[in-house]
Amino acid sequence: MADGDQSAHEVARRVARASYGKLIAYLAKQTRDVAGAEDALSEAFASALVDWPRKGAPDNPEAWLMAVAKRKIIDASRRKRSGEASTDHLKLMAEELEAMASKEQHIPDERLALMFACAHPAIDPNIRSPLILQTVLGLDAVDIGSAFLVTPAAMGQRLARAKNKIKVAGIPFRVPEWAELGERLDAVLEAIYAAYTKGWNDPANVQNNLADEAIWLGRLIVELLPHEAEALGLLALMLFLQSRHEARRSVSGEFVPLADQDPSLWNSEMIAEAEGQLLRAGELNAIGRYQLEAAIQSAHAARRLTGSTDWEAIVQLYQGLIKIMPSPVVAINLAVAVSEVEGPEAGLAALPDLAENIELMEFQPYWAAKAALLSRADSISEAAEAYGMAIGLESDPAVRNFLLAKRSALPKAN
Amino acid sequence: MQYMLMIYGDESAMPKASKESMNQMSAAYAAYTQALQKAGVMVAGDRLHHSTDAATVRMNNGKAKVLNGPYAESKEQLAGHYVIEANDLDAALAWAAKCPGAQHGVLEVRPIVKMSN
């Protein structure tokens, strides 16, 4: 019994991980009610944990969960309209769900449609990424909230509002037509990349690694839309960055900047996969932001083979990137790359102007880059000041300690 | 589902418009309305008089307080609306994009609450 119990739990956990988003997507597409689908599925999982240990896990656990969840949805909408003859819509839905439950062994994959609904232009851009993490991966508001620096209660509220909007505004669950696909896909990719960068900026948090989840979503998109160059580019970019995960911290937990990382610690399998995806993307002849960023990371990764970094190539790639995505972040990275080719003075000259981009005042990477460039240009007191800003604006203690050490190592200004 | 398309525009631009462009606009609206009807999605639609012809009412201590002018004083004012039947928000947005009002102003698309009786 204990064995059966354990294996039933095991099956439930496995199905939850692999099928959660698929089941939610399929149920929500029928009803447009994401929250209702989530409630029904969590009830179905609860039933499974009671039922399976007693009777053994069913042959097709996914279909079992789907059938139970559908019944829960029908029950819930009956309860809502209690005392009232079931409306045509409800009757129709019940019949349709019933008919499908009986013969359905294979559940169509509507996760892509679900992601497009979550990243619809009518949904607040800030909630798209959390919404995808919750609906496709089943992460809860506590985990998502902490990654996005929002209280669980506030995150729960925002997620609930977005789900309600999907329902009442009639946001469709479908992959957009070709004419609209590009723009809509950008929003989906952006949401996935936002999840990745949240995970990346929080390397100590291994238990709930958003970076892994984002890569999983990236793979899913590529599997479902294999001919979208930018989807391939995003996956390649995330894999390149992730390949350096082990090398970003020393054994004692200190921050190691890219230039000082030991390339033998990079994950060569991930790099190889990233190169493959980037190559596939290139063959589609539709260059974009993610492919360029992945190409930059590819150039960095080449150091493990050549022992040096081809900064001229990186400068060129950043120049291409800034043309299609002009942003202070890209400008800062370009300036750093320029400094490697032409020296720190040229790098400083290429930094975006603080007076024109006042938001840089609170932007840590600007001050960190500026401090390093000033230090190399022997402007010691200015460098110390810039390090001070970078330290004050940094939230990761490992990076803070690294910058503090850099500042202490500055020669004494006279 | 039903959606209301609310047409907001800059009223001050209207008197400056040439007669020709006014005629063009009317013809465009007539064609748009006809297209909505032919597609079987039109539920209702009206053009509104100038917002200076509006008045607002609110009850204050049991007494109606009436004020001259529209609810919100802004450059862009509600100039008219359509109610359409559409499968989903994308379909409604596609219709909104075709409305001549989207060229000069802004279309707000709002889902209508369906009353269950």
Image (cartoon, coloured by chain):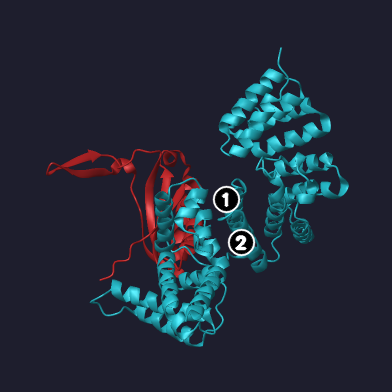
Chain colours: A cyan, B red
Q: Residue B101 at x, y = what percent?
A: 46, 51
In the image shown, does B76 or A367 lie closer to the viewer? A367
> Which residue is at a point 50% across and 77% down the rendered structure image?
A8
Residue at the right extreme? A306
> Which residue is at a point 31% across and 76% down the rendered structure image?
A78
Camera-side mark, 2 or 1? 1
| Image quarter of residue B67 | top left
Mark 1 residue element: loop
Q: Residue A192 at x, y = what percent?
A: 59, 55
In the image shown, does B74 or B42 lie closer to the viewer? B74
Residue at the left extreme? B62
Q: Earlier in the sequence, mark 2 or mark 1?
A: 1
Question: Is the C-beta separation of discs 2 and 1 under 8 Å?
Answer: no
Give the Cα distance between marks 2 and 1: 19 Å
Mark 2 residue element: helix
Q: Is residue A111 above or below residue A245?
A: below
> Which residue is at a point 50% across and 63% down the rendered structure image?
A138
Q: Mark number for residue A217?
A: 2
Q: Residue A49 at x, y = what percent?
A: 44, 75
> Which residue is at a point 49% across and 84% down the rendered structure image?
A56
Amino acid at the residue labelled 2: Leu
Q: Are marks 2 and 1 on the same chain?
A: yes
In the image shown, does A18 or A282 lie closer to the viewer? A18
Residue that badge 1 annotates: A205
Question: On the rendered image, what quadrant is the C terminus of chain A found in?
Answer: top right
| Mark 2 closeness class: few <14, some 14–19, many ≥20 residues within 10 Å | many
